[in-house]
Image: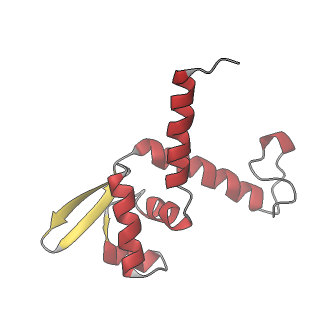
Amino acid sequence: METDPAADAVFESVAELFALLSTPIRLKIIGALCTSEKNVSQLLGEIDTTQPNMSQHLSTLYRAGVLGKRRDGTQIYYRLQSERVATLCRAVCTQVAIELDPGTEVQPEDRLLPLGGR
């Protein structure tokens, strides 16, 4: 069986993106920054974690190019740099929320979660 180097590169890139997004706190950070930029204190007001943990995840997302940042005095404000990542997160989180809603019927072929996965 022949391998397609272009397809392999796509799959490797997508796997790296999914690995980056595999931590719930990173998804929460992206969600919190969808509407506006925020500093660490504002993010900590919305997301239940410690300041060192928040800083570690912000740094990871920044190094990956998902977030941008700017300094204003002593504060650093973070913003989404990648609209594609935000769109992907919104789509997946919305689909999962729909599937977890007991009042919503989703056809098996349209599910991301297994039927018994609730």
Q: What residue lies at 45% left-to-right and 41% top-to-bottom?
A: 84
Residue 57 position, x and y percent, is: 41, 66
Residue 7 relative to residue 33: left or right: right
Q: What residue lies at 39% left-to-right and 45% top-to-bottom?
A: 82
16 is higher (above) or lower (below) than 9 = below
Answer with the quarter of the image where residue 69 lies.
bottom left
Q: What residue lies at 32% left-to-right and 67% top-to-bottom?
A: 38
25 is higher (above) or lower (below) than 87 = below
Answer with the quarter of the image where residue 7 lies.
top right
Residue 116 position, x and y percent, is: 87, 59
**Which residue is most to the left?**
73
Residue 36 position, x and y percent, is: 35, 60
Count the numbered circles shown.
Answer: 0
Q: Nearer the viewer, residue 72 or 114?
A: 114
**Which residue is most to the top?**
2
Q: Nearer the viewer, residue 56 or 36?
A: 56
Quarter in which the C terminus is drawn:
bottom right
Scheme of image coloration: secondary structure
Residue 108 relative to residue 39: left or right: right
Q: What residue lies at 82% left-to-right and 53% top-to-bottom?
A: 114
108 is higher (above) or lower (below) than 36 = above
Quarter in which the N terminus is drawn:
top right
8 is higher (above) or lower (below) than 49 = above
